[in-house]
Amino acid sequence: MASFKLPLKSLSLGVQDFNYYLGDDVFNETETIDTHHGDVNVHLSVERKTNDIFQLHFEFDGHITISCDRCLDDMDWEVETDYDISVKFGEDYDDSRENVLVIPSHWRELDLLPIMRDSVLLTIPIKHVHPEGECNELMMEKLGAHKADLDDDNRADSDADNENEKTFTLGDDPRWEALKNFKDNN
């Protein structure tokens, strides 16, 4: 795998540009099973502002292959995003602030791979499905058959619940009375 280490200590003041490639080897190592393939180019512009402060600007362009939530077939997901982060030397590692990373001053380089991989993975929406009509037809037929079975089961359960349903009001629960008394006293 290519090196994704940025030699911070040896960078001169001013702006320097770097290019990286995120391929299958990067995404196959992830803990998530969502990604199957990657083909993403990354352009990084680093501005060393002082001896201890760096401004990093990432530009991502490419695509990854993920599974469709509906039919489970692979689908291409376009990756086109930017990410900015300030990196500062300090006493201890601290990533608690948004877009600011503090690293120990004895570090000579910064591993960019986690930042780049996470930036790409964050472009994946919570629900990712093929456009309507592009899902695997056989899988959609099977899902449709099971959906009809589930609808019938839910309808039968709902009818049984309605027959056994007891009318319940807030007054039937003594906890509500305690809360009402608490509210009235305050």
Image: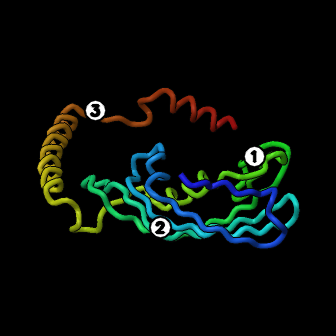
Kindly tell me whether residue 82 is visible in this rendering: no
Extreme residue toward the top, this view: 174
Q: Is residue 182 above or below residue 129?
A: above
Quadrant housing the C terminus: top right
Residue depicted at 15% across the width and 40% down the height: 153
Mark found first going from the N terminus, 1 or 2? 2
- Badge 2 marks a residue whose secondary structure is strand
In the picture of the structure, the residue carrying the numbered disc 1 is 94
What's the distance in space between the residues labelled 1 and 2, CA to CA? Answer: 28 Å
- Residue at 72% over, 48% down: 96
Q: Which label's residue is closer to the chain start, 2 or 3?
A: 2
Q: Amino acid at mark 2?
A: Val
Residue 142 at x, y = what percent? 13, 50
Relative to residue 136, is residue 67 drawn left or right?
Answer: right
Q: Residue at x 65, y 68 (%)?
A: 18
Label annotation for residue 79 = 2
x 70%, y 62%: residue: 85
How far is the residue under mark 1 from the one under mark 3? 55 Å
Color scheme of the displayed model: rainbow
Quarter residue 116 falls in: bottom right
| Residue beneath disc 3 | 166
Looking at marks 1 and 3 on the same chain, the residue that comes earlier in the sequence is marked by: 1
